[in-house]
Structure formats: C-alpha cells, structure tokens
Amino acid sequence: MSARLAVETAPATTLHVAPHDGDARAWDDFIAVAEGSTFCHRAAWRDVLRDTLGAESYDLVARDGGGAIRGVLPLARVRSLLFGDYLVSLPFLNAGGPVGDAAARDRLIQHAAALARRLRVDLLELRSREAPTSGAVQVVPRKLTVLLALPPSAAELWERFPAKLRSQIRRPHKEGLEARFGLEERHAFYDVLARHMRDLGTPVLPQAFFERVAQRLGDLVVFGAVYRGAEPVAAGCGFLWRGEMEITWAAALRAHQRVAPNMQLYWAFLEQAIARGARVFDFGRCTPGGGTHHFKRQWCGVDVPLPWAQWSPHGVRATPSPERPVYRIAVALWQRLPLFVTNRLGPRLAKRLP
C-alpha cells in the first residue's frame, strides 16, 4: 500500500502517536507525497540541528493500526538560561509544522502540547502553513511571507515587472556585478551573512550549520552570491521543494548599498527558480509592515499570513528577537564589536536562539 493510499483510507480511530523511531527513509517517503509538506520536513534536519546546534529532537509520528504513517511532526528543543526554553517545529526555519491528514495533524498537535507541558518549556511553537483545528494551541499571526507565481520563462517574468523595478535590477548589472550559484558558493554566502548579521546586531549561526546543510540536503539547497569584482557583496541560501523555491537566508553588505547588490541577488534567485522548474517563489518570512516586508512586496508577490500555532504556560508569544525592546541595548553593543569577535561569539549564542 502506498503512503498516499494509507493517508486516505486508514481509519482515524486507530491513530497512535509515538516518538520517531529513527527510520529516515520511511519518514522521507511519507513527506514526499504528503500534502502540505515542505523541505523543512526532511528527516535530515534532525541531524543538522543536533550535530551543529546541540538541539534535542522530539520528532513525532502518527501511525494507524496497521503501522502505516499518517502524519509527522518534527520538533526540536532549544534552551538556555539566558534566552529561555523552547520546543519548536522547526527552529531557524519558516515551516515544519504537522503534516498528514486532518485527524493525524490534530493528534500530533495534542501530543506536542502535552509534551510541552511535561517538559515545562516556556513556549511551544508550531511553524505551520495551515491553521490548526486543535484547541490545544492558538494561532499568533505575527509573521507572513510573500509568494510570487512564476511564469515558464524569466523573460516573461521580466515583462511583468513595472519599469521602476526593472530599472532597479539593471543598476547592479551596469556596475558589473555578477551572480554565481553552486554548493561552492556556501563559503561566500557565509562571509556575507556573518558581516550582515553583525551589522544587524544579531548573532550568526555557525558555519558548520551550513556545511552540514550542504552535506545532508545538497539535493535541495541552493547557494548563490553576487560579486563585485572578486568580493562577494550579497548572498543567499534557499531550497527547492516540489515546484517551489524559498530563499531562506539572504544578506547584502551595507558598504555596497549604493549599487543595490540585493536587487541582483533576488533577480538571480528568481531566474534560478524558473530554470529549475519552480512554479512559486517564496520570499521567506518577515514582520508585517517592516522594511523587509516592503522590500519583498516590490517584486509583485502577494502577502500570505503564516498561521504559526503556539502554547505557553506563561503567556509567551514569541521566541527571542532583536526587535524586542529588552534586547535593544545588546543589539547596539553587538553592532560595535569587531567582526572577528562576533564571528567567534555569535555562533555560540545563536545555538541557544530558536
């Protein structure tokens, strides 16, 4: 019996939720056909988060009476004395909530909420793309993404753009900037990301995290960088999954802002998405009304709210963010530190930030 047939025909009354037994192949076979699955659901993330960040895995699987998988929910615990204790699906990513049929998703959410109570975490956050029906959690609409439907060719997309946007994209081209793609661009990507995060006042993820992503998710990950001569000045990391490309991390150096390398970066990623057969481009999560949101909207996409679901015993509504007033002093101090210091300390702190 196929995984899809099992999802459609198994009776809901026989569902049983248990910790993932470690069978990565069975897990990935299920999400390959499950409606609503994303690249964030790949079993490899369990290894990436554990090996590079020390996150504790609490992945859950819902099975029917015959043992067939009906739903899955990846969960990772990130905790520290400084920032708090969080159970997230999934940390550092934009998705990863429960997938499967409606009954399985409901049972997985209930089980996750019960687990969060037993672990006494400050917050359970399920980063779902679909609003939950279970009353065990509530939706907190604090994030959204911007989606752009892609035509068959980059030339057709170019013609859809308004004249002002096309002019902005041409500017870095006229300055001689060049975009390059490939797994080897992960080094340039990290160099730009580390500088960008320092300027934002935010700790950067360890370089080992992206090295592990390249090793374990090399069939899905897309690294790209924009060069000004020999120097990378903008870079991104995205993922291609079932006809959709998401740019998950993107950065540009402030020192080169005049030539708008970020415009060339996003246009190059759009070209890559179309060339690789994607039908939808996901610009990644952002805060409604913020500067990042306005930048993404100019590409003619549409806003799509992210119905992340949460449970907290203490009324916690969000994971730590540099936007919160309590962190403003720390952000200002971090921006003044030398790059070699932030590159050394940042990854240690980022491991404790979900």
Image: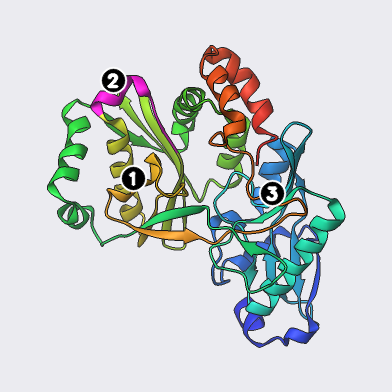
Mark found first going from the N terminus, 3 or 1:
1
Where residue 253 appears, as percent x and y from the top left, is 38, 24
The residue at which mark 3 appears reads as 316
- Amino acid, disc 3: Val
Quarter of the picture containing the N terminus is: bottom right
Q: Which residues are magenta?
A: 250-259
Measure how far apart labels 3 and 1 are at the Cα level. 27 Å
- Which mark is in front, 1 or 2? 1
- Amino acid, disc 2: Gly
Where residue 125 appears, as percent x and y from the top left, is 66, 54
Residue reaching furthest to the right: 118
Q: Residues within 10 Å of mark 2 (few under 14, many from 20)?
A: few
The residue at which mark 1 appears reads as 294
The image quadrant of residue 310 is: bottom right
- Amino acid, disc 1: His
Measure how far apart labels 1 and 2 are at the Cα level. 29 Å
Residue drawn where x is 73% and y is 54% of the image: 312
Q: Residues within 10 Å of mark 3 (few under 14, many from 20)?
A: few
Q: Left or right: where does residue 303 sit relative to residue 167?
A: right
Q: Left or right: where does residue 242 sit relative to residue 273?
A: right
Quarter of the picture containing the C terminus is: top right
Mark found first going from the N terminus, 1 or 2:
2
The residue at which mark 2 appears reads as 229
Q: Is residue 19 visible?
A: no
Q: Nearer the viewer, residue 94 or 294?
A: 294
Mark found first going from the N terminus, 2 or 3:
2
Measure how far apart labels 2 and 3 are at the Cα level. 47 Å
